[in-house]
Image: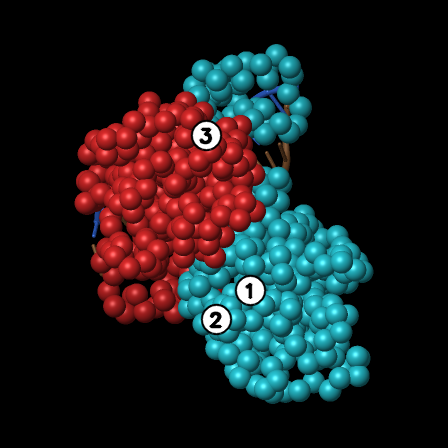
Chain colours: A red, B cyan, C blue, D brown
Amino acid sequence: MAATMKEVAEQAGVSLITVSRVVNGVGYVRADTRARVLAAVAALEYIPNQGASSLRSRQTRTLALLLPTIANSFWTTIARGVEDEGEARGYSVFLCNTDDDPVKEARYLDVLLRRRVEGVVIVPTVASTGQLRRAQQRGMPVVQLHRKLDDLDADIVRSDSYGGAATLTEQLLATGRRRIAFIGGALAVSTARERLAGYEATLRTAGIAPDRALAKIGSATPESGYTLMGELLARKPHPEAVVIGNSRLALGALRALRDAGLAVPEDLAVAAFHDIVALDADSPNLITATQPAYDIGRLGTRRLLDRLVGLADPPVDLILPNHIKLPPVAGIDKPLRTTEVARNLA
Amino acid sequence: MAATMKEVAEQAGVSLITVSRVVNGVGYVRADTRARVLAAVAALEYIPNQGASSLRSRQTRTLALLLPTIANSFWTTIARGVEDEGEARGYSVFLCNTDDDPVKEARYLDVLLRRRVEGVVIVPTVASTGQLRRAQQRGMPVVQLHRKLDDLDADIVRSDSYGGAATLTEQLLATGRRRIAFIGGALAVSTARERLAGYEATLRTAGIAPDRALAKIGSATPESGYTLMGELLARKPHPEAVVIGNSRLALGALRALRDAGLAVPEDLAVAAFHDIVALDADSPNLITATQPAYDIGRLGTRRLLDRLVGLADPPVDLILPNHIKLPPVAGIDKPLRTTEVARNLA
DNA sequence: TTGAAAGCGCTAACAA
DNA sequence: TTGTTAGCGCTTTCAA
């Protein structure tokens, strides 16, 4: 049915390899020969079979992106960055939703190995190390996004969780508030640990001993945020401000404040990491740190593609600054960057 | 480097084809032969090369999803449905963001043809027909999602735009309001046309002649929604209610109402199509119609996969009901479905 | 239940 | 500037 290179060659009266050269634009071909080949290509509506080419050349021009779920705007923006960079360099991208389930992730990795994907960009689960190392040993470069596995020797691109939390805390301190609480996600995740650490270190620097009773750890859901904020409000007097480690927690916490009839920031100031669009409606009154999701995807993929063309440097840990936004209040209106410069920028 | 089937065969002391049968689980193989082969597979860490298999068998087990952009929660939820269904049936999915740009779309379709993708699930642009027909002619089935191209002979799965708009309008009428306005997206898009039609027909059924001055058409952005709502509010008296054809328009329209100091629904009731999470914060006071995005993706992909195993029925137009949500007001609290049943459900 | 032979559509390596 | 030969790793077809 579909025409092959051989048929094009016969039609054009040249050899197979000449057609290959014309189609791929490599090597020397006389102009009139090229024209004859192109005419045959058009006449037969020839479309190269990339699978056959891959088999011989050992290049599939294919990447894979594994992330928790595409149905969340933070991951989604990363995905867009990955796809754009891949497309720009001639790579197609397989999309894999792991749901943070190691079993699902392992199954995908297996499929990708069979497909001889050239490289993998991944937001890893806590249990990914073994499988990823296996992939690396088989010559499949891996770039981690957002979350860092300590015992994996691979490039990583992420945002500055520690610095972001520190800046949010600083901004609250700058408004004169001292009793500042914290609500964050499970500490098994590296970003959550770093955010808590950034918050505590900043308090100490300001001469405030962190009060562990004011640091609440939950599960990255609005429900959890609602509950934890409720616990903070039950204290008399309640905290003057709170740093919140992720958007879903913030959503619930803000609801708790509304239900309690408290105004933000007058009664209680809120500074939160802001990843998801759902927070937009509330954000005018918040201090927010937004991660550069698109760039995380884009730069991670760039790094991966550079590896594919031979880059052999040691793995980098590329930490990108968050974008800090302050509420439009007189006197505090210049946005800051959490870190001065991204290190090791490719 | 990576072991081949041939090497496994030598190690196990059998022929190539026997290894193939064991690996693929087809045909007859004696238990002890199978065990020897499996041992060799493990020893050599053999992973089948799917590309080679595809070349011979002409099955790539690969689909593609083309949509405007993954960075929008409606499309994203569709994508999740597509990926889940594909994964469940052993297919990997290439993700392609077209940005509704026909040129980008055409370039992707070309790549996908080269890759011998087995089928395509697409949210088409207005200019897709030619390329898609070409794909069909080359044996690549196409399923349209959400938007219908009139002159393409392909399955489509979408939600009931006409019925959704009709129900939103009915619900507003049921609250006693009569002067009901409409704000919608560009009429070049089939869904926008159908929503306007559903609104107008419902008014007529209620004995109200649609007032064209109350039907505003814009460009599916919050800015446009803000402007158009402003125009409606400039009329004295302003409308008692408005039906809004998509979420981004609604976002802007609601902002305009806030800025004008009008309460929803007391001063002006709002019924809107609700696709994106950003609207959640406002939705308690709205009547909303939410499209079954996940099912659109899932059922569309199912249809495509059924075609791949030989289904030859004429193309269907599968129209799924929207989910209607009413504000928690006494007396009006039972959700409705816009259409009784999805027709032609596979 | 197992195998031999052929070939999918293309490119690498070398030769002319 | 063009061509020949070989073979990528697997499945199809036919035979035993």
Query: Looking at the image, is A90 positioned above or below residue B174?
Result: above
Classify mark 1: helix, strand or loop: helix
Nearer-N-terminus badge (1/2): 1
Mark 1 or 2: in front is 2
| Disc assigned to residue B247 | 1
Observer able to see residue B180: yes
Q: Nearer the viewer, residue A226 or D6?
A: A226
Residue bearing the label numbered 3: A217
Quick one: label 3, few (<14), some, or many (20+) residues within 10 Å?
Answer: some
Q: Residue drawn at (59%, 43%), measured in percent from left and top?
A: B84
- Which chain letter matches label 3? A
Identify the residue at image location x=70%, y=68%.
B168
Question: Percent position (x, y) of residue A343?
Answer: 19, 40
Please give the name of the residue rendered at 42% of the width and 64% of the height, measured from the top-left corner. Answer: B104
Against A257, residue A195 (above or below) is: above
Q: Is residue B303 left or right of residue A17?
A: right
Label 1 neighbour load within 10 Å: few <14, some 14-19, many 20+: many
Chain ID at mark 1: B
Q: From the viewer's perspective, is B281 left or right of A131? A: right
